[in-house]
Image (cartoon, rainbow, N blue to C red):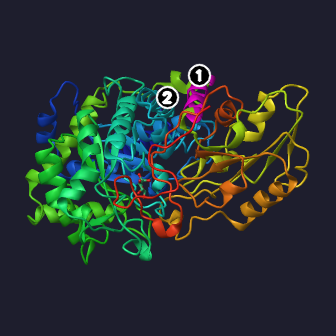
Amino acid sequence: MPRTNPQKVSMIILSALILLIGCNTTEPVVKPVSIEDKSVESIVEMMTLAEKVGQMTQVDRRYLDDLDDISKYHLGSLLSGGGSTPDVNDPAVWADMVDEYQSIAKKSRLGIPLIYGIDAVHGHNNVIGATIVPHNIGLGATRNEDLVRQLGWLTAREVRATGINWTFAPCVANSRDERWGRAYESFGEDPALISAMGKAQVEGFQGADLSDPEAIAACTKHYIGDGAPTWSTGLGGMIDRGDAQLDESRLRALHLAPYIAAIEAGTATIMASYNSWNGEALHGHKYLLTDVLKGELGFEGFIVSDWAAIDSLAPDYKGSIIQSINAGLDMIMVPGQIPKSHSYKEFISLLTAAVNEGSIPMSRIDDAVTRILRIKEQMGLLNADYANDRSLLPTVGSEEHRAIARQAVAESIVMLENENNTLPLSKNATKIVLAGRGADNVGMQCGGWTISWQGGHGAITDGTSILQAVESAVSEATEVILSEDGSNSQGADAVIVVVGEDPYAEMHGDRRDLSLSQEDLAVINAVKQSGSPMILVLLSGRPMIITDILDSSDAFLAAWLPGTEGAGVADVLFGDHAPSGKLSVTWPTSMDQIPINDRDTNYNPLFPFGYGLSY
Ligand code: GLC
């Protein structure tokens, strides 16, 4: 009897033990169930409460304790909040990151892929190298729906290139008070204009078929009345997230039309608003969320909350969850940013308890999950072979996309003054000076929601500054000088002074005073002293107080926040595009006129809604 090799025996026993232990892990062995070709209703029927609650939970990727939580908690969605970017901010790295998340999501029992949301609100603006298009206040000035639809399409391609399939846009706020830090996210102050532009953007994002590899789901926001609050009703006595104090007929007349248009366009999702209406928080407002939006308007997609926006609805978090879900919210953005918010594990546990105790009826849960899965089905996410399409990566920041964005910049510019036909400038001028801190500053051109939440000055991403655009536009013989403080402007054929606002987002942009900074005023004064013709280009998210400045300038262009394609500004300066922009908001003479809007009684602004000169 040959001696058995004791070592071999122990190896066999060891491997058997490992196998046995492997089978007896505490985790139940997940036996995958195919949902291919199953109806949404039948999928909902087979789902456990844990799976349903998971689908209703959205977490910022930064705050996942463990990537495996994506499948362990059956998460329905992840998001990248402003600035929530991979360590290397490169389109291919984004795509790898999202693909990894999706591969983990598919490990859950039902393997339902994630709907991944991001604020692509003026291009794919979190991603370095992406095409950054004008913010909405400038798009409103173009009055060009086809162009806005095209911008939505190019944004969707760049977003899908990175594996992401949902944008928290369009913002269809009706910005009634220029002091609001989100005025630039609005298409303007006229409901018909906002409706037309919002509808076009939804169509651009979603295309004809949500399952198209180039389509992304839209999220029309923030429902409802985000632009209505006045000063001191908002966060910390400012405006943002304030109380919309108006009767229902005014609320409907000024703020509801864009949602009717977006629903007609098939918006997949709608985001609830932080603000309250006559003292009642929108995130807990059953009448507006369920009776009006889902009932009266027939919205069949799903409603997502804003960032931790349910947290303070009730004295305790569980109460807030119960109130918001019963009011009609279907997915909760539980960023998971501890300690400012609550963890997704706490949310899941409390929501589960609320359902088990009967505080939230299962019918409400099933309605929410059905809405979410219905959208995922339309997006093709329930197909077994769903995968991100890497072939779109070369479109990110492509020449084709940048050319469309450049045209949008040119069409968004509103010419407010042109004394003695100072404009257009000659490309054969002898000496052109660029002055002001915005002259060579792509970050200032882009404004907030660019690479980071608040944006920033300087070369924050690939783009063309106004200085670079002027240098490219003029003849070899023309001397172009950058003089940020405006000195050395003597004897110039033209001095282009580029000033305006520092980048900001949300409540960080709430301002009591919209005057230009002392630094900008000093540059303007220096150039005026030089006696050379002055063209003022304003980079701002809203009208600023310029009444006295017009006495100094010979020509004045409102360029809003044009994004990366500064060449569009040069196109107007040198006459390749005759100014065609029309104000999408009223331009006040002074701060004490604000708020001032089209159709106000005794309406006497510096420039009225719709104003704009041309050559
Ligand atoms: C922000 C904004 C909202 C954005 C969301 C996710 O607070 O209010 O517009 O979509 O959080 O970043």
Q: Secondary structure at mark 1?
A: helix
x, y percentage for residue 604? Answer: 45, 58
Give whichever of 309, 151 is nearer the camera: 151
Instruction: Look at the numbered disc 1 and say if its residue's Cβ is closer than 8 Å to ligand 1.
Output: no
Residue 427 included in the magenta stretch of the image: no
Residue drawn at (17%, 52%) of the image: 49
Single out the residue that lies furthest toward the front: 420
Circle 2 crowding by C-alpha within 10 Å: few under 14, some 14–19, many from 20: many
Residue situated in front as seen by the camera: 240 or 196? 196
Q: Residue at x 29, y 44 (%)?
A: 258
x%, y% of residue 442? Answer: 68, 45
Name the residue: 47% across, 60% down: 178
Q: Is residue 446 left or right of residue 157?
A: right
404 inside magenta stretch: yes
Please tell me in which quarter of the rendered image ligand 1 is found.
Answer: bottom left
Q: Which residues are magenta?
A: 399-410
Q: Which mark is residue 515?
A: none
Residue under label 2: 154
Name the foreground residue: 202 vs 345. 202
Disc 1 designates what residue?
400
Q: Residues within 10 Å of mark 1 (few under 14, many from 20)?
A: few
Query: CB of mark 1 within 8 Å of CB of mark 2?
Result: yes
Real-space Cα separation, disc 1 to disc 2, in angstroms = 9 Å
Corner quadrant of residue 499: bottom right
Image coordinates of residue 9 in percent, x first then y, are 45, 40
Residue at coordinates 31% horizontally, 24% vertically from top-left? 209
Ligand 1 neighbours mark 2 (CB distance < 8 Å)? no
**In the displayed structure image, the side of residue 503 where residue 498 appears, left or right:** right
Amino acid type of disc 2? Answer: Leu
Q: Amino acid at mark 1?
A: Glu
Image quarter (top left, top right, bottom left or bottom right) of the C terminus:
top right
